[in-house]
Amino acid sequence: MSSEPLGVALVGCGTVGTGVAKLLLEKGDRLAQRAGRSLVLRKVVVRDPAKVRGADVPRELVTTDLAAVHDPAVHVVAELIGGTTTARKVVLDALAAGKHVVTANKALLAEHGPELFEAARKVERTICFEAAVAGGVPIIRALAESLAANQVTALQGILNGTSNFILTSMAEQGTSYAAALAEAQRLGYAEADPTLDVDGSDAAHKLAVLAQIAFGVTAKPHEIEKIGIDTIDAMDIRFADELGYTIKLLAEAWADNGRVALHVAPVLLRHTDMLAQVRGAFNAVQVVGDVVGETLYQGPGAGMMPTASSVVADLIDLAVGRAQRTFAAAKLWSGQSRGFVIEPSETVRSRFYLRLLVLDRPGVLADVCRILADHAISISSVIQHEALEGRAEQTVPLVIMTHYSETGKFRAAVGAIGKVANVAAPAVFYSVDD
Amino acid sequence: MSSEPLGVALVGCGTVGTGVAKLLLEKGDRLAQRAGRSLVLRKVVVRDPAKVRGADVPRELVTTDLAAVHDPAVHVVAELIGGTTTARKVVLDALAAGKHVVTANKALLAEHGPELFEAARKVERTICFEAAVAGGVPIIRALAESLAANQVTALQGILNGTSNFILTSMAEQGTSYAAALAEAQRLGYAEADPTLDVDGSDAAHKLAVLAQIAFGVTAKPHEIEKIGIDTIDAMDIRFADELGYTIKLLAEAWADNGRVALHVAPVLLRHTDMLAQVRGAFNAVQVVGDVVGETLYQGPGAGMMPTASSVVADLIDLAVGRAQRTFAAAKLWSGQSRGFVIEPSETVRSRFYLRLLVLDRPGVLADVCRILADHAISISSVIQHEALEGRAEQTVPLVIMTHYSETGKFRAAVGAIGKVANVAAPAVFYSVDD
C-alpha cells in the first residue's frame, strides 16, 4: 500500500461538496486510519469563491480555474457540480490528465456512461459513483461486490426521497399532493422546481445506473417508462390504504429469460412490505438475487453528510486500491453483455388497482366488467364508494382490484374503458405488488 | 489482474459447503466473468466421503486428508466445518501453507480472532468472513468499506434467525414459546438442540465480530451480556403488542464518549420500527454512522444458498484482489485501538417494560411505585391486567412502562421490587427502544 497521501480536488462546492470538504478537513485522522494513508484536500474549484462557506476551506485551495486539478499532487477529482454538460467535460478532462474520478452525478452516468467509462479504461483510471444512487445507501457496492455470486432477478427501489416524502405526508396526514409538495419545499426536501424529482426522471436516471450493474444493459433514461407522483390523487392513497396497501414511487427492474423490463411508477405495496415502511426522505432498494434471495438496503437518500459519506467511501476505496480492482473487473458500460435485452413492460405480469370516476347510473359497472372480461382480466374485488364531497355531482369512485394479467393487456382494457359512456374521467391505475 | 484460475479447497461439505460447491461447479462462467478469472474447485475435505451429496462433486476431488489443501493449485481454503477446535487448526494450517482463508465461522472469529488474524498478517495472507454474520446480508462489507468514512455510534441487529422465527410465530399466531420452538424445529429453522440460538450465544458471537469492525474492540463472547428468548412468556408479547410494540431479540452496541456497551437481549420496538418488520428467519442490522445517519441491511440470515452467496462473494473478492487490500487496511484484531473500551450496560439509558405478577391485594401497586420513585425512575404508564386464565389464582399481571433511566438503577429497583410481599413471581423486564 502506498503511504503517499491521496490528493483530492473537488469540482463544485455546493451541498455535497461542502460535506466532503468538511470530512477531509475535520476527520483527517480517521480517514487516514481507514485508508492506510492520508486523504488531502488539494483544490476546490468553484465558479464563485465567495460562495465557499460551511466548511473552513483554506482560501489558497479555492480557485475558479478548472485546469488547477491538473496539479500533480491531485490524484482524484470529485465531480460534484451536477448537470451533464460541464460535468462531462470536467470528468473527461480529469481522466485525460490521469486522475481518478469520483462522482455523485446519476444523470451524467445515465447519459454518458459508455463514453466516460471507455475514456477511463483507455487511461487506466477509475470512476467511482456510490453517491450517485440512493445517497448514503451503499447499493452500488452491494450490487457490484456483495452480490457478485448472483444474477439479480428483480430490483425495486425507492430512489427519490422527495417523492417518498410527499407520498408519506399524503398518506399519514391525508393532505393533497399540492399541500404535501409545499411542505416538502418549505422543509428543504424539494427544490423550487421539483419537476425532475416528482415526474420520475431522477429515479429513472438512478435505475439506468443500477440496471447497468445488475444486468449489463445500457438504458438511456428516455427508454425507461416512467410515471411520476405529480398526478397522484389523495383519494387513491386513501382507497389503497383501506385495501391494506401503501402507494410508493418505485423504480423497478424485472428480469425474466434474458429480458429485463425497467420502469418507474407508483405501485401499491402491502402495508407489511418492508418497502412500504420506508418513510419520509429515506431511500431503500430491495434486490432479489438468484442465489441469496431477497435482500434490502436502506438509508438516507440525499443530504449533505449522507451523500458525502458515500463520496468519501469511494475516496477511501481509491486510497486502499480496492476501487481500481473493482473498476477493472466490473467492465461497466463496456458493451460486455450479460445476455439481457431491455423490453417494454407490456409483458410484465402484475395485479392492478383501477380507479374510475363514473356517473351513478345503471349499467356502468356491467360495461366495465364486460370489457375486463373481454381482455381476459379477472377481478379480485370491487368497491363502489360513496360520492366524494367537493367532487362533481353524481360521479362516484369505482375501485377494482384485478388478478394477475399482462401489463399490455390491462392497458388495452383501460383504453377501452375510457370510451364507456358513463366513465367521467381518465382511469387511474397502478400495479399492485403482492 | 491475474488470469490464472483461483483454486479453492473446501474443508467441510455440509449445508453451506454443498451450496458453495454447487456455485463453483454450476455457475463457473458467471463467476469467471465477475472475477475476471476462473474460480476452480480443487479439493473437498470431509470426514466421510459418502456424505458428500447434493452437489455433483467429482469423486477425485473428495478426500479425508486435511493436508490435501497444501496442493499448490489451491489458493484459498474455505473453512466450513464450524466449531472452534478443528476449525482453528484448519485455518492456522491453511495460512501456514500460504493459503488465503474464507470462513463462515463466527464462533471461531469471536474466540480466536486475534491469533488467526496475527497468523494471517505474518504470512501476508487474507481472512474473509462475510458469511460469518447474518448469512446473506453483506454487513461485513457495509461496516468495513461502505461506511468507512463513519464512526459507528449505534448498531442493532436481528442476528439469529431461529429466535426471530420463534418470536414471529409467537406474535402472529399467539402460540407459546414451546409450541413455536417445536414448529421451528419441524420446519428446519431450529436445531434439535437449539440452545446456542435461543439463549443468545450465537447472536453474541456475531456481535463480537461486528464490534471488532465497528469499534476496534475485542470482546470475548462471555464478556457480552446476554438474555435469550428461551424464557420469554407469550403474555409479554401480547402486552407489548397492545402497547404498540413488537419484541425482537437484538444484538446491540451503543457507543458514547469512548465507551461501547454490548449486549444481546429481547427489546421492545415500536410496530413501525423497521427492525420490528423483520419477520421469520430473516436477519437485519441497523447501523447509525456519525456521518451518514441511520442505515439498514436486511436479508436471509442462514440457509444453504444465502450463506454460499456470501462465501462466494469473498472468493470473488480474493480473485479480484480487493479482499487483500481490505484485509491489509482494516488491521482487524490487531490490537489497534480506535479508543473504545467495553463497558457494561449499567450506564446505558433506556426506557423499560416491567411486568410483574402480583397478588390482587391492596397496597402492592403503591409499594412498587414507591420503589421506582426511590430509584428516581419515572413511570410513563401502568396497566393492571385482568387475571389470566390458567394462571395461579389471585395473581394479576401488572405492566409498567418507565421513562428513561440508567440500566443499573433500573435493575437495582427491580431487585428491591422482588422483595415486596405481594409480588408473586420474578419480575420480567425488557428495554424499550423508541
Image (cartoon, coloured by chain):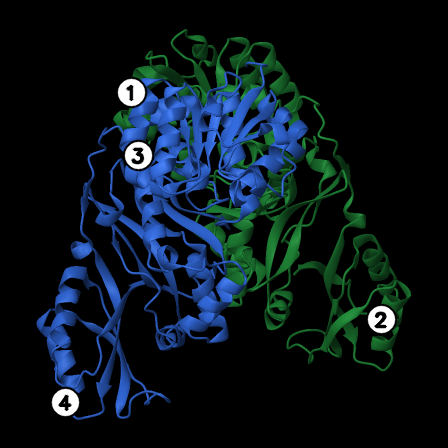
Chain colours: A green, B blue
- Residue B113 is labelled as 3
Dot 4: few (<14), some (14–19), or many (≥20) neighbours within 10 Å? few
Alpha-carbon span between mark 1 and mark 2: 68 Å
Name the residue tied to disc 2.
Answer: A368
Alpha-carbon span between mark 4 and mark 2: 68 Å
At numbered mark 3, what does the secondary structure look like: helix, strand or loop?
A: helix
At numbered mark 2, what does the secondary structure look like: helix, strand or loop?
A: helix
Amino acid carrying mark 4 in the image: Gly
Name the residue tied to disc 4.
Answer: B363
* Pointer 1 chain: A
Q: In the rendering, at what x and y percent does residue B416 appear?
A: 11, 73
* Pointer 2 chain: A
Same chain under badges 1 and 3? The reply is no
Alpha-carbon span between mark 1 and mark 3: 43 Å
**Mark toward the viewer: 4 or 1:** 4
Name the residue tied to disc 1.
Answer: A58
Amino acid carrying mark 2 in the image: Val
Determine whether label 2 and label 3 are within 8 Å by CB: no
**Mark toward the viewer: 3 or 4:** 3
